[in-house]
Image (tube, rainbow, N blue to C red):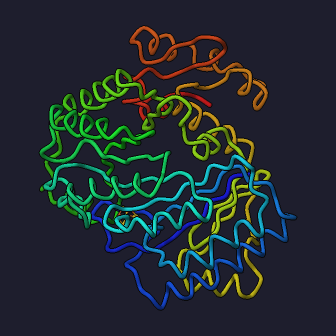
Amino acid sequence: MLLYIHVPFCRSKCRYCAFVSRPLDMAEMEVYATVLPLEIRHFGKKLNRPKVETVYFGGGTPSLLPAWALGRILPAITRHFDLHPAVEWTFEANPDSALDVEYLRSLIGYGVNRLSLGVQSFSDASLAFLGRPHNAKTAMAAFNAVRSAGFANVSLDFIWGLPGQREATWLEDLKMAVRLRPEHLSCYGLTIEPDTPLAAQAESGELLLPPEGEQGRMYVHGAEYLEEQGYLQYEISSFARMGFQSRHNCGYWEGRDYLGLGPGAVSTLSGVRHENPRDVRDWAALVKAGRCGLGGVALSREERVREYVMLSLRTAKGLRLSIYRRLTGLNFIKENEELITALRQNELVRLSAGHLRLTKNGFLVSNLILERLRY
Ligand code: SF4
């Protein structure tokens, strides 16, 4: 099983953010750090101290958890879950709250062995546009602090397709990242989520994004550059040095069971999906009343097939045709014969060894391909 812990606090809200996060409030932090160990204990007992292969602290900004909160929450995980001896335990951090080497060392002491740092860009203008509370100098200092603390598995997050960015400036960001030799890189295209300040700016016509062709070159040439530098692309936005793929994320894409704890966290266990209340106090009331994890919804066969197709086509391994046939009794290629022939002619998909895979150019237009496929 995969274990996800959601930390819903951030220094401030970034302009593009649609995640469950709110500005840090110490009264809410106190509630959170008191109630989360109760939820951990509840599920540890309910699931009979389940085996866990990966733990992921995401957010929000987990590195905003004060030392006293870490001391309440992290030991509860090892107490109530049976962690695999080679567990992958990731902790997300933002540069402005990942500068204290002692704090970072304490994470390692609790068992965390992978750190994911939200750098996003090395351009101060881009960081200001995104509403991030750090600059490039802080990002570098945080990376150095993370290495000094002893983290041997570090992932850096970046965003491409930003206003004012060009292929050359994006490649410059990647070159700076590669010079640091992180084990893993996640590179996301900027998406405009509804109800964000960025969406309002786009609606008013004030958002000038790089032209489509330029964005396409950023994605494809960026991915090629990373592969030349030894970072294998194993998913649409994920690149890793050999052996450093995120096992937690691979677990999601493979449709494995995951338990999500904390406000707004989602779980899928044995085909039943459940989402916690997003509000810290609503979530806390439910946990305190012993009512957490109730009221999940069983995924229908159609939903499971849909998720399998959408998630598998995000990965470099691609969609395994025999799994699709087992789930549906149908032949995926026959169902989509005309479209797949056209996509192959345009080198957007490849068929080999019983898998259908998107090429780099295919990844770039994956949403359009998924819209047209029948499944
Ligand atoms: S740090 Fe991440 S979760 Fe927090 S507001 Fe920014 S984008 Fe959202």
Residue located 36% across and 55% down the image: 118
Q: Nearer the viewer, residue 240 or 149?
A: 149
Is residue 96 placed above or below 365 in the rendered structure?
A: below
Residue at point 35%, 25% (across, down): 229
In the rendered image, which quarter is residue 262 located in? bottom right
Q: In this view, does 290 lie to the left or right of 308?
A: right
- Nearer the observer, 358 or 34: 34
Q: In this view, does 362 lie above or below 173?
A: above
Q: Which of the two residues, 42 or 100, is positioned nearer the viewer here?
A: 100
Q: Residue furthest right?
A: 48
Q: Residue 331, how many percent across, how many down?
A: 70, 19
| Image location of residue 327, percent across then percent down | 76, 32
**In the rendered image, the vertical position of residue 108 relative to residue 23, given as above or below:** above
Quarter of the render that holds ligand 1: bottom left
Residue sitting at 65 percent across and 21 percent down? 332
Q: Which residue is drawn at 45% across and 69% down?
A: 103
Percent from the top left, x then y, of residue 85? 74, 49
Q: In which quarter of the image is residue 253?
A: top right
Task: Left or right? Give the position of 333 relative to 144.
Answer: right
Q: Residue furthest top?
A: 345
Residue 306 visible somewhere in the drawing: no
Q: Where is residue 337 in the image (x, y as percent from the top left)?
A: 57, 14
Residue lying furthest bottom in this view? 27
Visible residue check, residue 237: yes
